[in-house]
Image: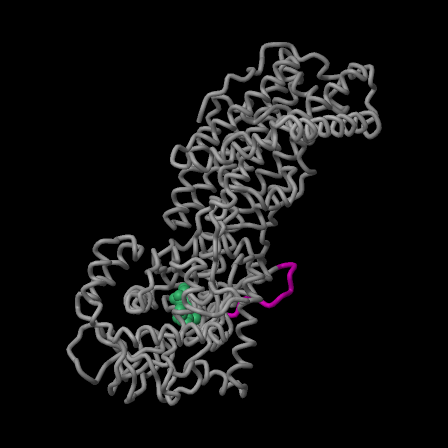
Amino acid sequence: MRERKSAKLNQQQPQPQLQHHQNGHLSPFKLAKLLDPDASWDKLIGFQIEKLVFMIQDQLGDVLHWTRQALGLFCGLIWGAIPLVGGLWFLLFAAVSTGIIYAYYAIVLKVDEEEFGGHGALLQEGLFASISVFLDALYRTCSAANTSNTAERFVLTTPLYYVNAPPHMGSAYTTIAADAIARFQRLLGKKVVFITGTDEHGEKIANAAAGNGSTPIKHCDSVSQAYGALWRELDISYDKFIRTTNPNHEAIVKEFYSRVLANGDIYRADYEGLYCVNCEEYKLYLCEPVNLKDEKELLENKCCPVHLKPCLDRKEDNYFFALSKYQKQLEEILEENPDFVQPSYRLHEVQGWVKNGLRDFSISRTSVDWGIPVPSDAKQTIYVWFDALLGYISALSEEEEQPSLQNAISSGWPASLHLIGKDILRFHAVYWPAMLMSAGVSLPKKVFGHGFLTKDGLKMGKSLGNTLEPTDLVHRFGPDAVRYFFLKEVEFGNDGDYSEERFINIVNANLANTIGNLLNRTLGLLRKNCQSTIAVDSAIAAEGNTLKDAVEKLVEKARQHYENLELSSACAAVLEIGSAGNVYIDEKAPWSLFKQGESGFTTASKDLIIVLEAMRIVAIALSPITPSLSSKIYTQLGYSEDQFSSITWSETRWGGLKQGHVTAPPKPVFSRIDLETEPTNTTDDTKKTSKKKDKQKTQKVVEA
Ligand code: MSP
């Protein structure tokens, strides 16, 4: 950060007229004068000019992006500096803001104009405000021009969820994480395409529809809608929702199949093995070659280790994909691109599979009707995984466009990141790259395999029936609590067990106390003592301040963690800002300083500004995780919803709260979860809790 030479607050000087104004209305300028009696008009206007220089320097700071910066600056200058255009704008600003400010003081606040310094002073104040507004507008134009057309694209995907049953907390977990990453990348100014959707073909879905006495498509429509509804409740900001029953998708799958066929990678053969319908995967092969070690251990009675259900004997005449042909290339890709599979321990797992030898796999089914017909053989349908993976590409195609692989690819492929659970790593890190290579399509840049949410150590899932109901959690605790808990408490990559008691403790301690309470009491003090007005720029208030230094380090740490997909550590770094703010305010005790009258006023009001600036930074840095809470913090700090929705990560730089800014009347941003602890059941040591006020049913956890 650059040092600024701005006017220093003079704490030694007596504070003229402070008592006189304490119960009346102080204009931002008057407050600034009280805090800095030396500040003169030319100094304050000089500061605005200095601010512009500072902003321009910032804009030009990143040499790597000099072209974009120069373009942005050029646009800004055209807008602001050509006398005819810029000059007219400026005059308009000056006239309007002078009028508004004059009217505000004279009519709304009924300020005694003599005491204020006469009409001249009021008009000067208007002029001063208009210069600020004009310079800020110029800066915003420069920034906007910088991020518009040249923004880098970031395409990320969740898995496409099976619609055999409604979503559960395990499926919601991947999507919440993807949403946090998408929001962070948007804050960086990237053009994000966040893809999610539903995987609707195959035996498992056909069985589920039959079990419900429904047709497959009606069943798919209803479960797919349930996913969409849950994403809305969880504040998921997806850009594309692909359903594999979408005709555009089907056209693209067929085209892809034909390309792979033309490349000589599809052949017909017999297949025999033990098949897990829930995994939609052969678990053990009873056909050649039999000695490959890529098979997973089956449990007793041929049970699948994930779903604990017996696998079925299957023998079919199918079309095969020549995966084994790509062994060498896959080995090289994994070797040369260690970031391709993350975390690194999953990369090692994948390397192990590939090294042990790859088996060609069947990509069609004769026994399944509910699927996309194989081109040129209508008796077979395409294997559900060969179909679904292509959803990541077909999602990119525009509705109005002719559905074609090329059109879809040119709308943003390759994906920057596939986010998946560890159970489907082999499909994404082995099958999918080989399929893409065969069709001559570029590979995604990264596959991240996260861990499982577990219940009593077992993967939570639809097939085991030990799920946690996400809608119920959201209705009881709100989306921010749910998002925060799972992202903060489960280290991304590892497994994590859910307990309601821990959920409530964490959310109350972190969101309600450390963040919510700190904001509320600081705003309360500002309202009581400073008419909710920021008396001096936060950058000036915090010159040489230790909290500011800590915040700058922590926010940079949070940024790096977000970049590395370490979401839990990113949350922890932001929370540390809140904790540091609490320690700071407790140590400084501004409430006592205010009681000392004029002598403590300067220091106390600066301390409040410093803590509120830290909270502003918390709001931005936590917005990928808790968007709705962050928006409330922003509103409490006196900003509009529009201002919140256009924030960027660069605004986590210290100095956003400006002199004269007025905060909103304090209102809690996050209510504590109050639960009555029910008597412990002695035969079952599971602690049961129920919500005091909210009569909604508590979470259902069906034990496996
Ligand atoms: N349809 C396939 C994916 C095709 S992608 C082209 C599928 N669907 S799924 O619904 O079974 O699983 C979707 C995702 O949810 C997977 O990443 C899976 O790991 C994740 N989860 C399902 N249960 C989970 C937990 N209990 N915990 C965390 N994630 C889990 O596989």
Q: Quadrant of the C terminus?
A: bottom left
The percent coordinates of residue 382 (x first, y second) are: 37, 80
Does 517 appear above or below 34? below
Residues drawn in magenta: 692-700
- When asked about the image quadrant of residue 537, the answer is top right
Residue 598 position (above or below residue 627) = above
Specify the quarter for ligand 1.
bottom left
Indicate whether residue 12 is drawn in magenta: no
- Dominant secondary structure (helix, strand or loop) of the stretch shown in magenta: loop
From the viewer's side, name the closer residue of 553 and 564: 564
Q: Is residue 694 magenta?
A: yes
- Left or right: residue 397 compared with residue 301: right
Residue 329, percent from left and from top: 21, 63
Quadrant of image for the N terminus: top left
Residue drawn at 26 percent across, 85 percent down:
268
Lateral position of residue 451 relative to residue 486, left or right:
left
Res 502 seen here: no
**Which of the colour schemes (rainbow, by chain, secondary structure, one colour) is used?**
one colour
What residue is drawn where x is 52% and y is 78%? 220
Instruction: Count up the numbered dots.
Output: 0
Q: Where does residue 197 sit, x and y in percent of width and height? A: 48, 67
Residue, x 26% and y 75% (percent of image)? 265
